[in-house]
Image: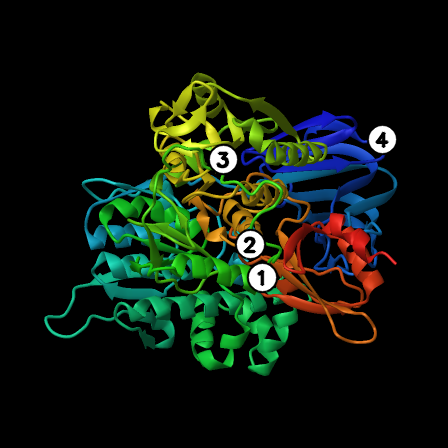
Amino acid sequence: MIEWAVDDGALCVTDADNAELSVRGSGLVVGGTGPDIPRPVDETVVVTTDELRFPHAVAYAFSLGSDEQHELDPDGAPLSLSPGEYVVDIDTEIKTYLRFSGTATIEKTGGYEETVVRFPDRVRVIIGFRSRHELPAGTITVPDTPEGIAAGLTHLATSHKTDGPDRTYPTLRGHPSLLECGDSLEIPDCIREDFSPSGIELVVPADYESLFVAAPLAYYLQATIEPRERPPTGPSHATLRVPEFAVEKRLSPMPGLERDVDRLLRKAFFFDCLVRNAGPYGTNLAEQSMLEVLGLDAEELYEAGPQRRLATYLEVPDAAIEHRLPDWHLSTYVRPDYDSVESLPFLLDRMSLVHMPRTSELEGKELVERSLEDFYRGGGSRGGNNGPDGRSRASTGKVASVDIVKPELHNGRVHGWLADGVPIDVFKTTPEAYHNRLDYLERATDSTSIAVVLNDPEMAGEHDDVAEIYRQRSEELSMEVTVDESLSTAELARVFEDDHDFVHYIGHCETDGLRCSDGYLSTSSLGRCNTQTFFLNACGSYYEGMGLIERGSVAGAVTFSKVLNDHAVKVGSTFAKLLVHGFSIERAMGLARRRIMMGKDYAVVGDGTHSLTQGEHRVPTTLTLEKLEDERAEYLVTFDCYSTRVTGSYYFPHVEGNEFAYLCGTQSNFTVTKSKLATLLQETEASVIFNGDIYWSTELASRFVE
């Protein structure tokens, strides 16, 4: 769903997930809804102008009168279009297309802050918009049988908009249909009619463990899942079949099947990301040379069908590419029972691997040791535990204790837990969290609503910091910030029950609930929670956070035990900064808790992949700086760009001399001088790890100005 309005001379566009886009132009006149254009769009608008300004974005131009196509040079050279009729693709947070006739120049501004389309005279332009956040198309009912679930999972791939390698682009993968439990298999006609088998088959043992683990591979390959009964003797294994090319690849039985699916999915996805560059949306990708080294023809494979491509990929030995595969972004550990089936479409929408949940007990001081290991690996500040206010955030009351276990983790930058137990190093999610996210997507809002609650005046330090962070960000995004202090139980309940996108609670939490001026609020007493996301920065707030998820929230940050007040201030202010700049809940917390020694006391509940707002860059960026020991005073800069929401995207580091884009999940390294580093930090909105602490790039830049 797209909504648009004209505000202060700009065309302001929003979608159902609060993504925003501001299109400005010289004397921009908006004429209303426009005609269709030859691209998939949700809404079109007609404007008249001689200039259109967009946030920094990748841009492509396609001639409608010929096969010519052009890409705006990521390194800054303008793109001039000769007279003709064009569709220009602007890859902003809300996908944008321009259709016009005539000549035009497309260029980036000096600081790479904007992408500008200029015309020699005022011209009529049709602008089309498409939301990246799509709702599921229909619901499939599946019975409590392996055969029924296999059929349901097979039909989820109808959400793909292509079976070619371009399906690696997140905009060409729609949200899978929902699955619901029922007495018999029911597939809506609209889903059956759209279903187009790829000809690839995945035969798996007829048990829920194997079906769940195989689901991500089958979904991406658009393969038909065929359950097979376990043989009377010996282990039951899976088989990947490509009948047209007589390929049968035998896979390991569980638990080895988890490893095999991991390798196959990462391999097929990686090769498709390289092959797609032979198509209309190609770019100068750093990893592209792999195809030439392996003797693979990108143009031939781009035109090939899914069976031919997969058969070719399978011929490449794993060892030849293992070291080049980007880190996979997400793994979710799912309890393999019928009740978990309804959550699978949400995991596949995020292209998550699925693993079986296995845990062991944390031994002795292992929690402390793991916290310190992460802290010192990140070069954390070693100035001691206590700042000017090193007191515990706990009150004299009893804090709820949480029995934490150690999970067996597989490949993945981020890990989710959809099973029993409370594990360390993962976000603990529930089926309710995913369905709640859909509810919020369907709500139309004009701006992001943030409520800051201070329920203990001794914690005013964090309160002042985060309130200022949210207010500063509200100058750039449509954001309403309210600040309340010393609320009663009824008043705090109303805060959670009102429509807020984020609530930042600062105070105490005890076994009876969140402390208020007249007692304690237990979130289990709420009839309904209409707060989308939250941070309960109080001791032992895990159970209260889970209560908010069960009653309507999508995700939030919590603590497992007592935390020191100065630690809470550090985590709270950093988390706030990252969250309002587009980082997901889990990634924001993962970075923020590195600032303190006992970072493992903080965790995320609900769908940790969820983001509150958008950032300046569609893929959140983290830079790591390291001063090199040489006479030239140079620095090694490492770019790390990835998001669980846009798997398959790429990023372009704007470093002088760089000519390449990189796949998200692949780090890139550059050596720069001190003065060039200052410029880079000023022009890049990113979190920065430097000397063991976390900074925001624009605030750190002044340290390097010569």
In the displayed structure, would residue 470 be above or below residue 244? above
The residue that disc 3 covers is 534
| Residue type highlighted by circle 3 | Phe
Query: At x 65% / y 44%, what residue is drawn?
Result: 615
Q: Quadrant of residue 130?
A: top right
| Residue type highlighted by circle 4 | Gly
The residue that disc 2 covers is 594
Where residue 83 appears, as percent x and y from the top left, is 83, 51
Which of discs 3 and 2 lies nearer the camera? The answer is 2
Q: Earlier in the sequence, mark 2 or mark 4?
A: 4
**In front of the other: 268 or 123:** 268
- Residue 195 visible in the picture: no
Q: Which mark is residue 378?
A: 1
Q: Earlier in the sequence, mark 3 or mark 2?
A: 3
Question: Disc 2 and disc 4: Cα gap in Å?
Answer: 48 Å
Q: Quadrant of residue 469?
A: top right
Badges 4 and 1: C-beta atoms under 8 Å apart?
no
Q: Quadrant of the C terminus?
A: bottom right
Badges 3 and 2: C-beta atoms under 8 Å apart?
no
**In front of the other: 305 or 706:** 706
Where residue 528 appears, as percent x and y from the top left, is 38, 24
Query: At x 50% / y 28%, what residue is drawn?
Result: 443
Q: Earlier in the sequence, mark 2 or mark 1?
A: 1
- For label 3, the SS is strand
Query: At x 68% / y 33%, what residue is drawn?
Result: 468
Q: What crowding class fits label 2: few (fewer than 14 Cα within 10 Å), some (14-19), or many (20 or more)? A: many
Q: What crowding class fits label 3: few (fewer than 14 Cα within 10 Å), some (14-19), or many (20 or more)? A: many
Q: Which mark is residue 314?
A: none
Badges 2 and 4: C-beta atoms under 8 Å apart?
no
In the displayed structure, would residue 438 be above or below residue 278? above
The residue that disc 4 covers is 27
| Residue type highlighted by circle 1 | Gly
